[in-house]
Amino acid sequence: MGAQPPTAYRALDFVVSHGFAHRIERLNAYIACTHSGGAHRPTFPICRKCESVAEAGARPVERSPDQEAEAPWFAMEQGVVELEELCPASAEAEKRA
Ligand SMILES: [Zn+2]
Ligand SMILES: [Zn+2]
């Protein structure tokens, strides 16, 4: 395993910072964004059995000033929420076990 060329890192930075992909810290992996276009705040249920990841619960970032005043969100910067769950397939397998 050699070191990756720096350009590979820059390319990943680019796709992540532009919302084309999200970094899943827990799995040390990247997942392609399923919400094309527009910044959003996704949550990622991660299956604790098979480590499959889904993008869920994305909320659009644009809000009216009223909404923002009512319930301000944290800054987007580190805006990835990772949840430990069971995917349907693993939940089914667990039921049968
Ligand atoms: Zn996304
Ligand atoms: Zn699973």
Image (cartoon, rainbow, N blue to C red):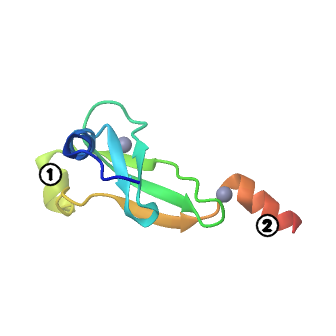
Which residue lies under the disc numbered 1? 66
* Residue at the image point whose x is 29% and y is 30% from the top: 37
Q: Position of residue 31 (x, y in %)?
A: 43, 46
Which residue lies under the disc numbered 2? 94
- Relative to 26, say whether 79 is above or below: above
As drawn, the label of residue 33 is: none
Q: Is residue 91 left or right of residue 55?
A: right
* Residue at the image point whose x is 79% and y is 58% from the top: 92
Depth check, front residue: 72 or 91: 91
- The quarter of the rendered structure image containing the N terminus is bottom left
Q: Position of residue 86 (x, y in %)?
A: 64, 63
* Residue at the image point whose x is 16% and y is 55% from the top: 68
Disc 2 crowd rating (10 Å Cα; few below 14, some 14-19, many 20+) is: few
Sequence order check, earlier mark of 1 and 2: 1
Q: Farthest residue in the right direction?
A: 96
Amino acid found under the numbered disc labelled 2: Glu
Disc 1 crowd rating (10 Å Cα; few below 14, some 14-19, many 20+) is: few
Residue 33 position by quadrant: top left
Q: Is residue 90 left or right of residue 24?
A: right
Q: Position of residue 45 (x, y in %)?
A: 51, 58
Q: Farthest residue in the front direction?
A: 2
